[in-house]
Image (spheres, grey):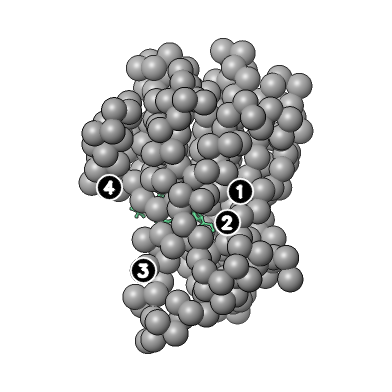
Amino acid sequence: MKLAGKIAIVTGAASGIGEAIAKKLSSEGATVAICDLDHEGGIRVVEEIQFLGGTAAFYALDVTKEEQVQTTFRIVVEKYGKVDIMINNAGIGKAGTVVDQSEADWDLMMNVNAKGTFFGCKYAVKHMLEKEIRGSIINISSVAGMVGVLNRSGYCASKAAIVGLTKSVASDFAEKGIRVNSISPGTIESPWIAKILADQPDPQKMRVQMQQRQPIGRMGTPEEIANLACFLAGDEASFITGSNMVADGGLTAR
Ligand code: NAP
């Protein structure tokens, strides 16, 4: 129980990587605020955590709305007294090269991925400073923030913004004991990837391509990202801040 007594907010926690992170933090003793646009999925995750003896509650949240992020912090703090761990995970991806990416898709990805993470960091840091909490903030970026993934211009830009923001916030508040890190996953077998595969003319062929582009020869699991997030959230990572931790089965190694 490495996180006993800790309170965590996880955005995009109704599905995939966010769900796995919420469950992992709970399994280590943290109380978890499950935040998402998806009510049904969020309530399912809360019920599954409670079934296993954990403590969690669902909060409907659109991370692109500053007022909603601020209100969520207020309500979670009123209920649990504090927030020690902030996981900015909610994200969205739309395909397109710079030639054919629409302005609407660009704005959507920058709003959810970059601005949503900015709001999450802003209110987490404000709260941690006010309460003098030596907290941990973890932002979910992507290998697409490090290398040029084909046909993902806006997504790559929005995920690179998260890496830059993470380093900036980490530098500004390291002296206050607030640690801020990003995680850059490779391809992870989540509902998001299942939807991408289902839209392909030949999903099996695409699945094999996705597996083979990672030298380890398979996609990652949400639980493998959750293990890293849990490590960064806890005291074992006490000297790690401003890092972009890559978990990609070797994709960016070659
Ligand atoms: P997922 O299964 O689609 O889960 C994302 C969750 O975020 C969904 O429940 C989604 O709700 C929610 N969400 C979307 N927009 C939101 C908003 N504005 N406010 C609050 N919640 C919102 O995706 P995932 O694969 O777990 O991805 C999670 C994160 O990992 C994302 O940031 C993604 O970029 C990153 N990532 C994923 C992979 C991968 O291969 N899966 C690789 C690298 C990085 P709705 O379903 O209602 O939209």
N-terminal of the pair, mark 3 or mark 1, is 1
Label 4 CB less than 8 angstroms from ligand 1: yes
- Apparent side of residue 93 relative to residue 184 in the rendered image (left or right): left
Query: Splitting the image into 4 quarters, where does residue 171 fall?
Result: top right
Check disc 4: other Cα within 10 Å, few if <14, some if 14-19, many if 20+: some
Q: Where does label 3 land, which residue?
A: 195
Q: Is there CB contact under 8 Å for labels 1 and 2?
A: yes
Q: Secondary structure at mark 4?
A: helix
Can residue 84 be seen here? The reply is yes
Can residue 73 be seen here? The reply is no
Label 3 CB less than 8 angstroms from ligand 1: yes
N-terminal of the pair, mark 3 or mark 4, is 4
**Labelled disc at residue 41:** 4
Q: Secondary structure at mark 2?
A: strand
N-terminal of the pair, mark 2 or mark 4, is 4
Q: Which image quarter is the C terminus in?
A: bottom right
Check disc 3: other Cα within 10 Å, few if <14, some if 14-19, many if 20+: few
- State the image coordinates of residue 19 (x, y, percent, origin top left): 38, 45
Residue for point 62% across, 26% down = 235
N-terminal of the pair, mark 4 or mark 1, is 4
**Labelled disc at residue 183:** 1
Q: Amino acid at mark 2?
A: Pro
Check disc 1: other Cα within 10 Å, few if <14, some if 14-19, many if 20+: many
Residue for point 28% across, 33% down = 52
Q: Secondary structure at mark 3?
A: helix
Q: Amino acid at mark 4?
A: Gly
Q: Nearer the viewer, mark 2 or mark 4?
A: 2
Q: Amino acid at mark 1?
A: Ile
Q: In terms of depth relative to the viewer, which is nearer, 225 or 121? A: 225
